[in-house]
Amino acid sequence: MAEISFRDVTKVYGDGTEAVTSLSLDIAEGEFVVLVGPSGCGKSTLLRMLAGLEAITTGEILVDGEVVNQVHPRNRDVAMVFQNYALYPHMTVFANIAFPLRQARMATAEVTRRVTEVAETLELTEHLKRRPASLSGGQRQRVAIGRAIVRQPKAFLLDEPLSNLDAKLRVQMRGELAQLHATLGVTTVFVTHDQTEAMTLGERVAVLNDGELRQVGTPQELYHRPADLFVAGFIGSPAMNLVRAEVRSGEGAGDLVMDFAAAGSVSVPEAAAELCASAPQDTELVAGIRPESLLLRDPAAAAEDLPRARVRFTELVEPETYVHLAGDFSGVDPGDPDAPPRDTLVARVRSDRTFTPGEEVALEIDGTGLHLFDIESGRTIR
């Protein structure tokens, strides 16, 4: 196992493209860290620099306290699993797993012992004489992982290893990877663009965008305390609702109201009173509302000044329903706050509640899922 550190790492390609910008990140010995972000954010480049497959422009990468910038990939003692498995089609499963050991000129008896142990761990024993073409996608992925494990490296590097599997196999392999890490305890860096994978696998998750590290923390920290608009909009499914709003004084002493302009306003819930009191008043900001915190009420029974919206369509995702709404809201794109406003929201409700397209609903906010962001910097208002 190994500690891994990125210190002000930057990668600039020959055409001037800056893939990674002054990124610093420490990964503890035995930790499972996931790098997540949209396509082109620099996460795979970061992994390839750690493996030695890409040169670093500036900065340092350390493995167990040793700077490895100039160390050849084969001498870094890290094992990488690629998205396309990279198996040798003419070799058996046994030969594929054994390949790095034979390259290291290990004794035949030790090669056999290690491959047999790894095959048992990954439930590949009965497939050792088969070739990759006769295996399922999940089995091929296990072979690729087995080839990495058998080396007993200091760290495992996995570059979107589940992206070629169908949905059911992805769920199965996520569980197997988590169990494998719990068994082996090897430092693991896992790259994905799928935030569901990131949130279910990572002990900590590092969110990247445009080559920059936006936030690193546990899945719970990212979901409940996002650092900025990008993280808030990227983490969570369905995504957080982000709309322009203002906080202003209400009619009673100490009362606060959140005003959504043409859509209407809501009294600030008690759970969010302290947060809203700390925000600048009568100044436009961005309100972030998790779908489960957007409460749908019967407009006939709700207060007249509550914002109204109409149901566009619903998605049944048992045991919940996602209700897509349209109204007079000024929505914000987390990737580009200056983009044209969107007027759609999403609420997450129990699946036993039914809604029809065109139906009007009144909106309330559960303050426990309310977040506020500065509209200029995008940073969270605490």
Image (spheres, rainbow, N blue to C red):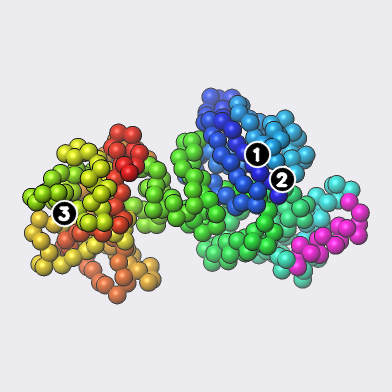
Q: State the residue position of label 3.
A: 267
Q: Residue furthest bottom?
A: 352
> Observer-nearest residue: 111 or 252?
252
Q: Badge 3, how many Cα within 10 Å: few under 14, some, many 20+?
A: some
Q: Residue furthest front?
A: 253
Q: Secondary structure at mark 2?
A: strand
Q: State the residue position of label 1.
A: 50
Q: Quadrant of residue 172?
A: bottom right
Residues under labels 2 and 1: Cα distance?
Answer: 9 Å
Three-letter code for the amino acid on which mark 2 is drawn: Val
Q: Badge 2, how many Cα within 10 Å: few under 14, some, many 20+?
A: many
Does the CB distance between marks 2 and 1 fall below 8 Å? yes
Residue beneath the point at 23% across and 51% down: 273
Residues under labels 3 and 1: Cα distance?
Answer: 50 Å
Query: Magenta segment range?
Result: 106-120
Q: State the residue position of label 2.
A: 78
Q: Disc count in the image?
A: 3
From this viewpoint, is residue 110 visible?
yes
Q: Quadrant of residue 164?
A: bottom right
Three-letter code for the amino acid on which mark 1 is drawn: Leu
| Relative image position of residue 47 (x, y in whole percent) | 61, 41
Q: Is residue 209 above or below residue 60?
A: below
Q: Is residue 112 magenta?
A: yes
Q: Earlier in the sequence, mark 2 or mark 3?
A: 2
Q: Quadrant of residue 348?
A: bottom left
| Relative image position of residue 254 (x, y in whole percent) | 14, 49
| Relative image position of residue 347 (x, y in whole percent) | 29, 60
Q: Secondary structure at mark 3?
A: strand
Residues under labels 2 and 3: Cα distance?
Answer: 55 Å
| Relative image position of residue 220 (x, y in whole percent) | 44, 55
